[in-house]
Every structure is written in structure tokens, then in C-alpha cells.
Image (cartoon, coloured by chain):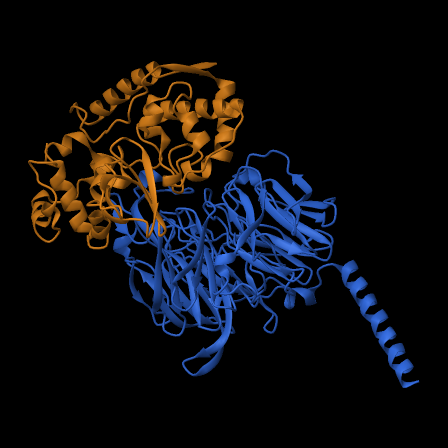
Chain colours: A orange, B blue
Amino acid sequence: MTRIIGIASTALLAVSCLVAAQGRGGQAPSPASQRPPQTATPQTYTAEEIQAGRVRFASECGFCHGRDAAGGETGPDLTRSDLVAADLRGDRISGVVRNGVPQKGMPSFDLSAADLGAIVAFIHDQKANADTLGGGRRSVDVADLQTGNAEEGQKYFSGAGKCSSCHSADGDLAGIGNRFQGLALLQRMLNPRSGRPAPAPAKVLVTLPSGEKIVGPLVSRDEFSITMTDTSGARRSWQVGEAEFTVDDPLSAHYDQLGKYTDANMRNVFAYLQTLR
Amino acid sequence: MRGMRFSMRFLYGLILVIGLAALALAQGVTPAAMLKPSADVWLTYHGDYTGKRHSTLSQITPANVTQLKEIWRFQAGQQQIKGTPILVDGVIYITSPDNLWAIDARTAQELWHYTHPRNNAFHIGHRGVAVYKDSVYLTTPDAHLIAFNAKDGKMKWDVIIADARKGYWSTNAPLVVGNHVMVGVSGDFDNLPGQLKSIDADTGKTQWIFYSTPPPGVSEPQSGGATGGQMWMTGTYDPELNLVYVGTGNPTPVLNGPVRPGDNPWTCSIVALNPDTGKLVWGFQVSPHDTHDWDAAEVPVLVDGDFNGTPRKMVMQASRNGYFFVLDRTNGKNLLTKPFAAVNWAKEIDKDGRPIPDPAKEPSRDGVLVAPDESGGTNYRSPSFDPATGLFIVSAHDSYGVYFFKPDHGAYGWAGADYGVGGRSFLRAIDYKTGSIVWSHSIGDGAGSAGVLTTATGLTFTGDLPGNLMALRTSDGTTLWHAPIGRVGNSPITYQLDGKQFLVVGAGSSLVAFALP
């Protein structure tokens, strides 16, 4: 048996939406049935590849991503991943698996081409299954997140939460409720660094002993050194003591806020952001 | 004549010493050696039975630590080293899932290598081997326990400790007490009872099984229907009390609390067991009714010392739930409960010293913001206790996660969803008498992976998140030395061979040794 992934799943999704709509007495599908990103290019895998991939995936990836690829300890739900949706026969997934994503805690895997191919087949098949069924095991739907009060959220935003000291509803956040929905919006609100796409990195100002100043995006820093990208695009590093540097990371305020939110604050601000369309 | 008699006596003495040494060699690692490990070995996961991960070696000092040089580096496959190397008789045993290498501790020359047949269990990490007499004991991802001849890697026996097809796997470094090889498993992706097995070191036969949650077919109403509570980390042992201390994992289903009402003993607990029978002597639940995946598997560290003016035998744990506990280890009574990392989930500390979960922080349909996140205030990375300063030093994680549960998520395995939304890590020194943080040293964004080793010269070794191995001054946390060797994923060890003190630590998938020139 060969499964065509993409076309088939889209068709099935259309059917399931129709069923859902009828189930609700003919209402149009609400944005609550937040659809996972759609597979960009239809692709086919054999049942043998998918079965081999199920076993390899469970063994190599299942701990973090769940044995069904719908999320496990620490790893995201791959059936709702933009990267998986954009992938064609492993052209994007392979690099992530082979190189890892160290900044997000994902190790690199040294897998044979056959194992990797089977894993890719399984992920795509699971995505097709999840699309068909509407929501993975670990799904968080937009409808689940509608318990906040937008008015209260706005008050917190411009009052106690001090969000308005950096943000404005008709400035940087204009249309945020269109650009992100549901869990993606919540994650971005709580900490843009935990969401996708990744926000701009912090800025570094380096002052060399000569007095020369260099400004650019931060690549990495630790107790002993700092690395940044200069205006020519080259990476440059200095040890502590070789230069003065100051890091400007306005997003760190989001981390500080995590310790201050009540759950009600969080839900209310989320409700308010949803209204910014 | 007197001189002659003296030399005869000396000769007899010499023969006796040689004889004893030969006997010791033939016996390999004896129970007596494990009770008082010498400077030239690292015989158990924690180095000794107390779990202090503290060494009395004194060659490397704050004054000369900056001269440490890399002596050798051993590439152990591709996977990050998470285990503790075991050293006996000049040979280091180091593991990764499905792999065990014996290497020369002086040169890192490979002596033998065992590769387990390919299997489909989780391969997330491995904590190392145990040794006893002339055997090395290895757990495998598919939940076997294999005994090897330490010298040549010849397999002696291979037994199955749990059914991998049901969802059990093992990363465990067994704890050996007498002829008991105590071995735990993992398995919280399925609703499985928590089990710790004692295996006869010589024959591989099962001696006893301790269940932290009821075994199949047994009804214990007080469990609330919970499964789980796996004992996947190596415990500690008090020979005077003849008690083994083990931390138990989270209940299953993991995030679905309503389906398993009550405290769910003995999940998320420190349990004291008799190693000869496997019987529970006492238990202390550090997280009653956990709904956040906070295993209490972290090292139960045994310390003898003063508490509030009274000499005490204590057990201390910095637990994944963000709280630091001091208990009287003779009876499990609580002496102190204090947070060491960001926490917001407990509504009170009850009269028995247990943090009681706030029902409002149980995973919900619309999400709750909880500190710490699922990876916890700390995790399996070892802490260290420094007797000179009374400081308990731990890699702490101030972190936040959003936790969800709705009935659609079911009641099997994970049964919920959670997402980390930010964390920062610190090495923290806790005054065990008060629980207050004496110093806190930033080690980077995200969750730390390196454990801690302290030495009698006032040094603390650990790794930061960007990938530096560091030596800090134990008393105040000041950095004295660092080496950018890559992310440390295990807990450092030290030993002395041929008069030279070695520091050995995992860096990514290699094992690296440092010493003074």
C-alpha cells in the first residue's frame, strides 16, 4: 500500500470540517478548529517505510516527541510543525535530525539514510493522520483558550503588567491577533523566544580599547566571552577583559514577567491580544 | 639476632600483605572496598554510598587549578555522555545506550567494547555501570541486565528485568549492596507500575521486587489508581541502618490528575528500603499528587551532622519540584523544606513538611502557568555536599511552563500537554541548616545538564550551558578556572593514580581527563 500524503489529507480534512460543521447545526467552522499547517508538496511513502519508521521513530525520537510524533517530554508536536509541513521527502527534516537544534536542547542523530528515510515517512504519515482526525493527542485548540477577559487584559497591559512600556496596540502589535492564534499566540506572548519564528536576537555594543564601537546582533555569550555579528556579516568574539560590552535584550522583560503573572492575568492579556486584528 | 628476627617478621608480614593483595585482586571489588573506597577508584555512580559526590583528594587546589591540562580524550560513539564513569583497577567503564567501553584510565586506550543488539526501546541516555567482585553490570534500553567479566568483557549472564514491549526501558546505573544488584527502569509513556528489582550479583536470579505503585492485579485503594513512580536513578545506602534510599518518579497518567485522586503514594517520594528484603521501612512524599512530571528521582544525599544543635543522620534532596528537603533518615521525619528554585505550585507546606499542591495549578483546559517547567528545578544531574562548609550545591533551573489537560487527552501515558516558556540556570549553594541560598552563580539560559563535584581543597567542578567546564571556589562561588570543552552532560568524578589526581568529565560524546602537568 502506498499513501499519498498532502492531497489525500486535505480532501479528508475538508470532509471532517464538513462533518464538524454539520455537527454544530450548520454553523461555519469556527477559528477554534485551528488547522495545523498543511503539507506543501504531496508525497507518497510505502506501508513498509512507514512501519519501519514507526519503530525507529519510537526508539530514537519518541521520548521527546511522543511515540505518535504528537509531542512528548520537552519535544514539540511534529504533526503541527511548520517545518514538517514544508518538508519534501526529508529535505528539511534531515538537516534538523543530523545537526540537532542545540539551543532548543535537541541533540544530533547519526542515523543511516534508510533509518532517516523511514523516520521521515512515519512523521509525514502521522501528520496526515493527525490532520484527518483533527487534533493530536496533545492538542491545545483556540477554543480551549477563551476564558480570559479582554477588557481586564487591556487594563493589565497598560497598567500593572507594564506591557505598554515597550508595546502598543496600534504599533508593533497591530494585527497580532491575525498573525498568531491559539497556542502560538500564547507562547509568543509569554516569551517570544519560545515561539516561532524566532524573534530578532539581542543587540550588543562592543567598545574596543581603541575607542572603536561595534554594534550588532548577539550570537552567544557566556561568563568568559561574547560573540556577535558585525556590520560586514562576520562573526567576531572577544574574551572578557579584551573589550567592554553591553547587551541590550528588551525581550528579557518577558522572562521577568513570567514570575509576576497570575493565571487570570495571563488569560486576560491573551484575550486582549486576540482582539488586535 | 634481633635484627634477624626483625627481618623475618618483616618477611612474614610482607608475605601476608602480598597474599592479602592477591586475594583482594582475585575477589575484585569487595563489599568492604565499597564501604571505604580508596583514592584510586570510583566504584559506584556517586563515588561512594553517601551520594555526596565529594572527594578528599587534595592535589588540585584553588592555587593550582588554573594549570589543569587535558591529558586524554575518549570518543564514546555519537551520543552525549550522561553517565558516570566507573573506575576500578586502573580501568574506566563508560556507557551510552547499547554500548559499554572498558578503557585504560591512564591512556584512554580501549580495552574492550560491548555493543548490545539493536532494539527498539528509548535510547535517551545511559547513567553507567555497577561493579562487584570481578563483574561489571550493564542495563540496556530494552531492560536487560547483563553481567560481564570486568577483565575481558566476556558475558556471564543476561537477564530481562522488565518487559520492554510494554513500554519499560532502562538507563539505570545499578546500586550494589552486598550481593544485591538493585536495578530500576523507566516507563512513564505507559501506565506501568514502578518497580525496583534486586538481582543476585552472582547468579542473575531475582531476589526481590519493590513496587512503588501496586503491581498488576493488586488493589491498593490508597494509591488512587495511579501507576508509575519509576526508580530510574541510583540510590544511596547507610550500612549502619542497613537502609537503601531511592527517589521515585512521577505518577501516571502524567498530567491527568482527576483520574487518580489522592496523594498517589509512593510516587514522587524518597523511600527507605531494607536491601535484604526490599521491604519499605519508611517513605516521604516530596510531591503528593504530582501532575507536572516532577520525578523525585534526584540523588538522596546522606549527611551526618548537626541540625538545630542535635547530631543527626540526615538525607537531603534538591527535588525536581523546586524544593530542598532535609529528613531524619532513621525515620523519614522532615527537618526542613525550602524552595531552591522558582516555584508557584504549592499552597502550603503541611505539618509533615510536604508541599501541598494548589489545585488551581493542576493542568487545565485553558492552561496554567507553573514554575518550574516539566524539566524541573533540577533533574538527574548530581548535586554535591561539601562537609567543610555545610553547603549543598545544586544546578538549579528557574523555569516556567504552561500545562494543559482536558478529557480529550485521555488517561493513558502522558495524557496532557505542556510547553516550557523560559528558564535560566544557576549553580546554587544551599545552607542545609536553614535552606537559605548562600550564593547563586549564573550558568546560562535553559536547563543545565552538568552535575557537581566538590573536593576537600574547597573546589567545586561543574559545567555551564554554553559548554565550559568550570572550577569555582566552594565557599563563595567565584570562578577560578574554565575550559571550553563542550556541553558537560554528566557529573564529574576524580581519582588519584600513580600519585596524580585526575578530573574526568563528559564533554558532548567524549570523555575528557584533566590533571596538573
- Along the horizontal axis of the image, is B462 left or right of B423? right
Return the x and y of residue B44 as percentages of the image width and height: 60, 58
Answer yes or no: is residue B347 visible.
yes
Q: Position of residue A267 (x, y in %)?
A: 17, 45
Query: Which quadrant would the C terminus of chain B be assigned to in this image?
Result: bottom right
Quarter where residue A20 is shown: top left
**Residue sitting farthest toward the bottom:** B2
Q: On screen, B228 above or below A202?
A: below
On-image quarter of the N terminus of chain B: bottom right
> Which residue is at a point 65% across and 61% down the rendered structure image?
B40
Report x, y in % for residue A126: 40, 26
Q: Give the number of marks.
A: 0
Tell me, yes or no, if residue B162 can be seen here: no
Against A227, residue B241 (above or below) is below
Q: Please tell me which residue lies in front, B137 or A24.
A: B137
Q: For this rendering, which residue is in front, A11 or B507? A: B507
Q: Quadrant of residue B281?
A: bottom right
In the rendered structure, the answer to whether residue A79 lies left or right of residue B51 reads: left
Q: Quadrant of residue A100?
A: top left
